[in-house]
Image (cartoon, coloured by chain):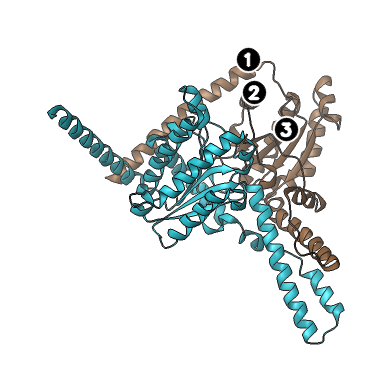
Chain colours: A brown, B cyan
């Protein structure tokens, strides 16, 4: 009996999300078509870095990933960090870069310039090994320096700071900017192990599965992000 | 007098009815997986005070009442671990009077935890304070330490209060501890080698090799290592960032951000959060197992 009620409640939740998704889809089409005025001029000044987390199984769909990147390039996003847990995107880096170039070759002149200029968009590929494992690597680097210093100078104790840690991460090749906005493409609103060091005040927005990605939804997320006020704890 | 009595009786009946309904809903929810650990970012106290023309202190007091109900609901539901982000290191940058007021409130409430009628006693809650407690002023730190010591034998539920905490500070602290540990180990080994009359060169070579720190070495020194990773992080006010909270521990965690301000958070928000968690749980479990 209890189980039946539980199943019924989950069915209601499912229907609710179905209705919500339908509304969002319609809204996305309206935004893409340019019918909603408030979304026509996007303010990208706050969005210096964008991160995209993709569920690894969905990341095999390179065609969609490239389409997504081209959308973002058209919107005018300059720096993108692509993340998936298993490193599927890292492995497909070459194909993505090549494909993006060739795809753009077939586009009309004005758009072609957008992506072919290396200053227009930078791409970074990371996976779960760049997160916690990266911190362990930076810790080893710091520890070595710490032991060297304490051996030579008879220093009693060095106190590490966040700045030391940031520099150590850079020294082991795992530094990088803090994305302002992180879009999650996957079934659940979860960052799936995106490097902790780079996520302090990042806005995390769940975009649903990659296979149902919508251009309008990205515009909406970026527009909403531009409106957010952050006071960084103060 | 009679009118008063009947009002009182009505209130009691209403409360009983609420408790009963709550228990029924929890029984139904318990058919599915129940989160073992829920973490809360209690955002929106100041906005709440502004919306209702209260002073900021009143906003925090309303927030405390909301916290008490939320803890009660969580423990009734069977959630063993609850973590709250009470004060971040970045919050020290606020106006000094505001910081002082929040600290006063904190001290008052921490001391209140140990009173007979407190929920800590009734639910058998063990309290941990998580963060760089050295940054707190002495009376608050002492109250926190006393509360931890006084509840260390409770084992029915656990409340983790993040005070003077940020996730990046926690990471740096863990790395520091791991290095200190490595240094102590190396010194011990070196002294042993000197005792054994071994050559110094071998000792130095070893020293180089033994600088390597494994992930597990860092993880065991995290402040949050006393609890399993959270299953849900709730951030109120509809904000979607983690604000330097449990960044390390939320790899497989469902992030829930209801639009209510923290003092407005209620039973229905918790139920909706748990329902959403139950929808997400099979996927998150699968991901955990894959790693």
Q: What residue is rendered at 84% in x and 74% in y?
A: B204
What residue would you read off at disc 3? A69
**Residue B51 image position (x, y, % from top left):** 48, 22
- Of residue B56 and residue B239, the one placed in the foreground of this image is B56
Q: Is residue B278 above or below residue A112?
A: below
For marks 3 and 2, give the CA distance. Answer: 18 Å
Task: Indicate the chain on which mark 1 is placed.
Answer: A
Q: Nearer the viewer, mark 3 or mark 1?
A: 1
Mark 3, residues whose alpha carbon is within 10 Å: few (<14), some, or many (≥20)? many
**Residue B110 image position (x, y, % from top left):** 46, 48
Image quadrant assignment for residue A58: top right
**Quarter containing the C terminus of chain B:** bottom right
What residue would you read off at disc 1? A38
Numbered mark located on residue A91 in the image: none
Mark 1, residues whose alpha carbon is within 10 Å: few (<14), some, or many (≥20)? few
Badge 3 and badge 1 both on one subunit = yes
Q: Is residue B127 above or below residue A67?
A: below
What residue would you read off at disc 2? A223
Mark 2, residues whose alpha carbon is within 10 Å: few (<14), some, or many (≥20)? some
- State if disc 1 and disc 2 touch (CB < 8 Å): yes
Q: Is residue A83 above or below residue A36?
A: below
Q: Which secondary structure lies at badge 2?
A: helix
Image quadrant assignment for residue B183: bottom right
Q: Which secondary structure lies at badge 1?
A: helix
């Amino acid at each position: 009996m209890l189980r039946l009620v539980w199943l019924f409640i989950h069915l209601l939740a499912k229907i609710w999300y179905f209705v919500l998704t339908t509304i969002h889809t319609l809204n996305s089409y309206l935004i893409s078509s340019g019918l909603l005025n408030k979304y026509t001029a996007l303010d990208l000044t706050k969005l210096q870095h964008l991160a995209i987390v993709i569920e690894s199984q969905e990341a095999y769909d390179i065609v969609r990933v490239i389409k997504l990147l081209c959308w973002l390039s058209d919107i005018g996003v300059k720096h993108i960090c692509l993340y998936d847990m298993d490193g599927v995107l890292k492995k497909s880096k070459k194909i993505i870069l090549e494909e993006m170039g060739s795809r753009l070759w077939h586009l009309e002149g004005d758009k072609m310039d957008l992506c072919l200029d290396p200053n227009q968009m930078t791409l970074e590929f990371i996976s779960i090994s760049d997160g916690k494992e990266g911190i362990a690597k930076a810790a080893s680097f710091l520890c070595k320096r710490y032991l060297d210093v304490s051996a030579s100078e008879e220093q009693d104790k060095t106190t590490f700071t966040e700045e030391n840690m940031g520099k150590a991460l850079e020294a082991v090749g795992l530094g990088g900017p803090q994305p302002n906005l992180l879009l999650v493409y996957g079934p659940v609103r979860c960052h799936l192990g995106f490097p902790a060091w780079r996520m302090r005040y990042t806005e995390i927005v769940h975009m649903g599965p990659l296979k149902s990605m919508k251009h309008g939804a990205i515009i909406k997320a970026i527009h909403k992000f531009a409106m957010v006020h952050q006071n960084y704890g103060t | 007098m009679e009118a008063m009595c009947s009002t009182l009786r009505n209130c009691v009946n209403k409360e009983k009815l609420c408790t009963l309904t709550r228990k029924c809903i929890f029984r139904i929810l318990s058919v599915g997986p129940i989160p073992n650990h829920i973490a809360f970012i209690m955002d929106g106290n100041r906005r709440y005070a502004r919306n209702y023309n209260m002073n900021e202190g009143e906003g925090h007091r309303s927030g405390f009442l909301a916290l008490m109900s939320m803890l009660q609901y969580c423990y009734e539901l069977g959630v063993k671990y609850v973590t709250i982000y009470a004060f971040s290191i970045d919050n020290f940058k606020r106006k000094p009077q505001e910081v002082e007021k929040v600290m006063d409130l904190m001290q008052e409430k921490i001391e209140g935890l140990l009173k007979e009628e407190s929920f800590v006693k009734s639910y058998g809650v063990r309290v941990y304070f998580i963060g760089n407690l050295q940054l707190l002023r002495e009376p608050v730190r002492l109250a926190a330490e006393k509360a931890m010591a006084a509840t260390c034998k409770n084992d029915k539920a656990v409340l983790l209060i993040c005070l003077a905490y940020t996730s990046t500070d926690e990471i740096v602290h863990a790395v520091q501890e791991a290095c200190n540990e490595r240094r102590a180990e190396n010194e011990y080994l070196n002294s042993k080698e000197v005792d054994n009359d071994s050559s110094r060169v071998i000792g130095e070579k070893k020293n180089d090799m033994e600088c390597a720190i494994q992930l597990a070495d860092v993880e065991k020194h995290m402040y949050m290592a006393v609890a399993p990773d959270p299953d849900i992080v709730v951030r109120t006010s509809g904000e979607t960032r983690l604000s330097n909270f449990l960044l390390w521990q939320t790899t497989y965690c469902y992030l829930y951000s209801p639009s209510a301000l923290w003092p407005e958070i209620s039973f229905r928000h918790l139920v909706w959060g748990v329902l959403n968690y139950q929808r997400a749980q099979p996927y998150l479990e699968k991901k955990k197992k894959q790693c």
